[in-house]
Image: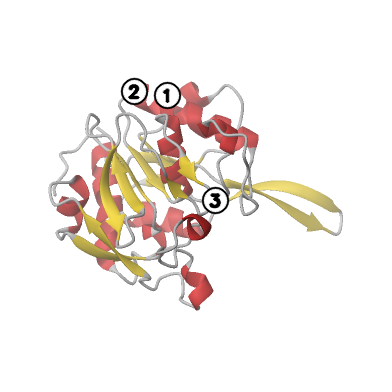
Amino acid sequence: MHERPIIGITPSPSLETMPHGTFERFAMATTYVDAILAAGGIPLVLPPQEDHAAVLTERIDGLLLSGGGDVAPERYGTSDVHPTTYGVHALRDRFELELVDAANARNMPILGICRGLQLLNVAYGGTLVQDVASSESEALEHRQHETKRAKDDLGHQVRLDPNSVLAAIYGQETIGVNSFHHQAIDAVGDGLTVIGRATDDVIEAVADARRPFVLAVQWHPEMLFERHADHLELFRSFVRVAARQPQEV
C-alpha cells in the first residue's frame, strides 16, 4: 500500500517556435497536477516513447489519460478524416494505447479525461464521432469557450446512471460539467459501459465494471475542482484505489 500513490499522467505534444529554433514539446495544463496533488497523489509525467509502456506501469500506481488532440481515425478503422480533426500524433496514440493494455494487465486504476475517454474507448475497440456539431443537428454546444464561458464555468448537465460508480462518487444523478470537445464516442468499446450522457445524448462517461477503477469522462474535472468541490471527489476516489485503499463512496 502506498500512502501517496504515484499517478502517471500523459502529456500533449506541441510545436513551439523560439528565436533559436522550432521544438516539439510535451506539456500539459498544471490543473492535472494540481488535482492529483489535492487528492493526495504524486503526479508523474509520462512522455510518449517507444517500447516502455509495460516498464512504466510497473513504476506507477495509477494512470491518468489527459486531454489534447484527436486520436487518428485509422486507429478506429476509418480512412475518412473530417476537416475538423486536429492534433493527431502517431507516437502519442501508440504509446497511450500500449499504456492502457499494460495498465489493464496489472489491474491498475485508469482515469481518462476528454481525449482520454476517447482514447480509452478506441483501446477497447470502439469508434468515435469525428465532429459532434456537424453530425448531430440537435447537439448542445460542447465547446463552451465558443459561448464565452470560462474553463471553470458549468456549461451543461450530465445525467449519471444512478447505479454507477460516478453517481456514488458525486452523490447525485445529475451534475454540472464544463465542455471543450468536438469529438465523442460513437460505438462503445467492448467491455465498457455508458454511465453518463449529456441532455443531447452524447456519451459523457464510461467505465469498465470488471476493473477496480477504469473510468473516463468527457469533461474536465481538473479545471473545476477548486471552484466546484464535488469534482475533487473523482480524483480522491481514483487516488484511494491507486493507493490500494478501500474506495469510500
Q: Residue at x 30, y 35 (%)?
A: 192
Say whether residue 48 is visible.
Answer: no
Relative to 21, 65 lies left or right: left
Residue 181 in picture, x, y percent from top left: 48, 57
Indicate the amino acid at tag 3. Answer: Gly
Residue 157 in picture, x, y percent from top left: 29, 66
Asked if labels 1 and 2 touch by Cβ distance under 8 angstroms, the answer is: yes
Relative to 210, 97 lies left or right: right
Q: Earlier in the sequence, mark 3 or mark 1?
A: 3
Neighbour tally class for label 2: few under 14, some 14-19, many 20 plus, Cα within 10 Å: few
Which residue has dot 2 on it? 106
Q: Earlier in the sequence, mark 2 or mark 3?
A: 3
Say whether residue 10 is visible.
Answer: yes
Q: Residue furthest right?
A: 20
Q: Residue at x 57, y 34 (%)?
A: 78
Indicate the amino acid at tag 2. Answer: Arg
Kind of element beneath mark 2: loop
Give me the disc on residue 102: 1
Kind of element beneath mark 1: helix
| Residue 100, quarter of the rendered image | top left
Asked if labels 3 and 2 touch by Cβ distance under 8 angstroms, the answer is: no
| Residue 111, quarter of the rendered image | top left
Give me the disc on residue 68: 3
Quadrant for the N terminus in the image:
top left
Closer to viewer: mark 3 or mark 1: 3
- Kindly report the distance in space between the C-alpha atoms of the residues bearing marks 2 and 1: 7 Å
- Kindly report the distance in space between the C-alpha atoms of the residues bearing marks 3 and 1: 21 Å
Q: Residue at x 57, y 30 (%)?
A: 94
Residue 66 in picture, x, y percent from top left: 47, 47
Indicate the amino acid at tag 1. Answer: Ala
